[in-house]
Image (cartoon, rainbow, N blue to C red):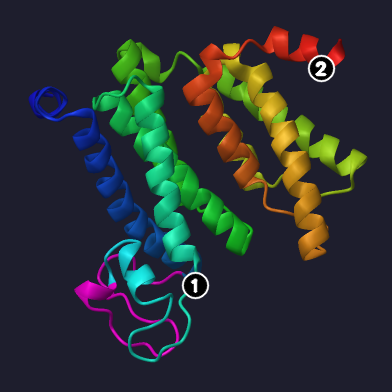
Amino acid sequence: MEILSLLNFQLSFAGQVSLIATFALILGSFASLISHRLATKQPMVFARSQCPKCKTALKIRNLIPLFSWICQRGKCSNCKNKISARYPLIELSFAISFLTVYLALGSQIDLKTILCCLIAGTLIVMCVVDLEHYFIPDSTQYFLAFLVIVLRIHEYGINGATMNISAAFSYLGFGLLLLMFFYFTVRLEAIGIDDIKFFFTAGLLLGTQSLLLFMLFNGLFGAIFGSIWQKVKRDSTFPFAPAICMSLFITMLFGSKINLTEIVGSLIF
């Protein structure tokens, strides 16, 4: 805690932003690797990074987050084949989400900010795997639940770990209702067992007071993303994790500042 206090005291706003952005890009680079290996069942840590085309082991200069891809013009330095844009996009999404957390939580580096950044990063990994492979790895679900419990304990003491259990089951029920809603209205198999488990963890984090707002965001993002996905991919199913992740991220940071009554009233009247 003393280190965090020192960072807030010694570093200017620009210095803190630079520190968070750098950390986010590094973590995003690691997450782009992890998200790929989680889906393909490759070794997580000990296998060296390599070009997916020519299998050449990458050197340190090839692994600088974002800048290596830009300097190499999106191509492998050895075989000159194109490198997927997924890597810089994931790294950039980490930087944007971490800085959003930092600004939303009062522009200070503390334990809550760090935990919320890690939650945001985990959500991004979930989105990537679901978009590319249509499932959410259990390991990311467990890690997200762990981060949520640690955050709740940090904010409310040891009782914070269990105080939202009833809310978690309410969110679970909401997930089942959402499954039926998408199936009977637009004939989309939008919700799977991985998504249902995800709702339980969302309830642990957000509590009953944010359920309606979370539901609204899920329905909105799910409908928009599902329609686009169906038109582009011509697929009757679509990955729902991005809608849940976006809903959870926004509600976690801004839920207390959003007046749902005013939003609904403006839509009706």
Mark 2 crowdedness (10 Å alpha carbons): few <14, some 14-19, many ≥20: few
Q: For numbered disc 2, what is the local secondary structure?
A: helix
Distance of label 2 from label 1 (alpha carbons): 41 Å
Closer to us: 53 or 206: 53
First along the sequence among labels 2 and 1:
1
The picture quadrant where one finds residue 211 is top right
Q: In this view, does 57 lie to the left or right of 207?
A: left
Which element carries disc 1, helix, strand or loop?
Answer: loop
The reply to whether residue 166 is in sight is: no
- Majority secondary structure in the magenta region: loop
Visible residue check, residue 29? yes
Q: Where is residue 75 in the image (x, y as percent from the top left)?
A: 42, 80
Front residue (pair 93, 158): 93
Q: Answer with left or right where residue 186 lies relative to residue 150.
A: right
In-front residue for pair 18/150:
18
Tell me where residue 264 sits by quadrant. top right
Residue 267: mark in rendering: 2
Q: Which quadrant is home to the C terminus?
A: top right
Query: What span is in magenta?
Result: 41-62
Give the number of the disc on residue 189.
none
Is the residue 264 above or below the residue 195 in the image? above
Image coords of residue 159 (percent x, y): 36, 12
Quadrant location of the N terminus in the rendered image: top left
Q: Residues within 10 Å of mark 1 (few under 14, many from 20)?
A: few
Residue position for label 1: 84
- Which residue: 73% across, 40% down? 222
Amino acid type at image mark 2 = Leu
Residue drawn at (38%, 64%), measured in percent from left and top? 33
